[in-house]
């Protein structure tokens, strides 16, 4: 029976959905995997030190690694390529949410929202320790052209 090493934590309902969708597969987390399982693992979800151990075995069956990060530089890419393992990342999955948070942070600073919130308590109510401004006419440098930077770009 093919096996998935669930190196990344998942919610119980997500794991249940995977088990229901793929009833012929076994799903084990890193704590439950034994050395006898190493050659049964075909898919790895997340990264774990066991990856190098599995790749070093000449009888390994690993075919696919899914990581939950945009970057994959921390993986043993040469060994994965030599073994013919496909690697997938999650580049861009949070781009919209993070770019919106960047915009919120910029507005919070220039409009003094955080300072105003802090000053809602005690004797200093409504006395802002700063002068507020706007983003009108300001220039913004977006450093990086990845999914987050592209999502933050004005249309």
Image (cartoon, rainbow, N blue to C red):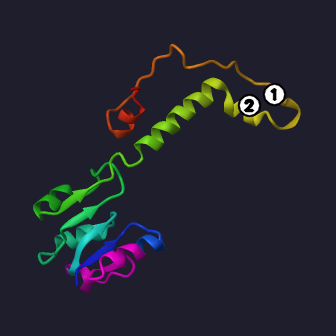
In magenta, the rendered stretch is: 16-39
Which quadrant: the N terminus?
bottom left
Would residue 147 be counted in the magenta stretch? no
Determine crowd level at label 1: few under 14, some 14-19, many 20+ residues with C-alpha closer than 10 A.
Answer: some
Q: Quick one: 48 or 146, which is closer to the camera?
A: 146
**Residue where numbered disc 1 is placed:** 126
The x, y position of residue 7, in whole percent, is 36, 69
Whether residue 133 is situated above or below residue 113 in the rendered picture: above
- The quarter of the picture where residue 22 lies is bottom left
Answer yes or no: do the residues labelled 2 and 1 have beta carbons within 8 Å?
yes
Among numbered discs 2 and 1, the one appearing first in the sequence: 2
Quick one: which residue is furthest to the top in this view? 137
- The quarter of the picture where residue 110 lies is top right
Whether residue 15 is situated above or below residue 136 in the rendered picture: below
Determine crowd level at label 2: few under 14, some 14-19, many 20+ residues with C-alpha closer than 10 A.
Answer: some
The x, y position of residue 32, in whole percent, is 37, 82
**Residue where numbered disc 2 is placed:** 116
Which quadrant: the C terminus?
top left
Q: Which residue is drawn at the image coordinates 42% and 47% (left, top)?
A: 94
Q: Secondary structure at mark 1?
A: loop
Whether residue 140 is situated above or below residue 66 in the rendered picture: above
Q: Which residue is drawn at the image coordinates 64% and 25% (left, top)?
A: 111
The x, y position of residue 120, in whole percent, is 80, 35
């Amino acid at each position: 029976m093919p096996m998935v090493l669930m190196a990344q934590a998942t919610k119980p309902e997500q794991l249940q959905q995977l088990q229901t969708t793929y009833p012929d597969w076994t799903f084990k987390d890193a704590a439950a995997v034994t050395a006898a399982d190493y050659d049964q693992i075909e898919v790895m979800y997340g990264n774990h030190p066991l990856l190098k151990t599995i790749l070093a075995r000449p009888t390994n069956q690993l075919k696919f690694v899914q990581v939950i990060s945009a970057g994959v530089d921390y993986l043993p890419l040469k060994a994965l390529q030599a073994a013919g393992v496909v690697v997938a990342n999650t580049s861009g999955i949070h781009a919209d949410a993070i770019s919106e948070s960047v915009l919120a942070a910029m507005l919070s600073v220039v409009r003094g929202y955080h300072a105003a919130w802090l000053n809602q308590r005690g004797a200093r109510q409504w006395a802002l320790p700063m002068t507020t401004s706007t983003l009108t006419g300001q220039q913004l440098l977006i450093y990086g052209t990845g999914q987050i930077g592209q999502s933050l770009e004005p249309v």
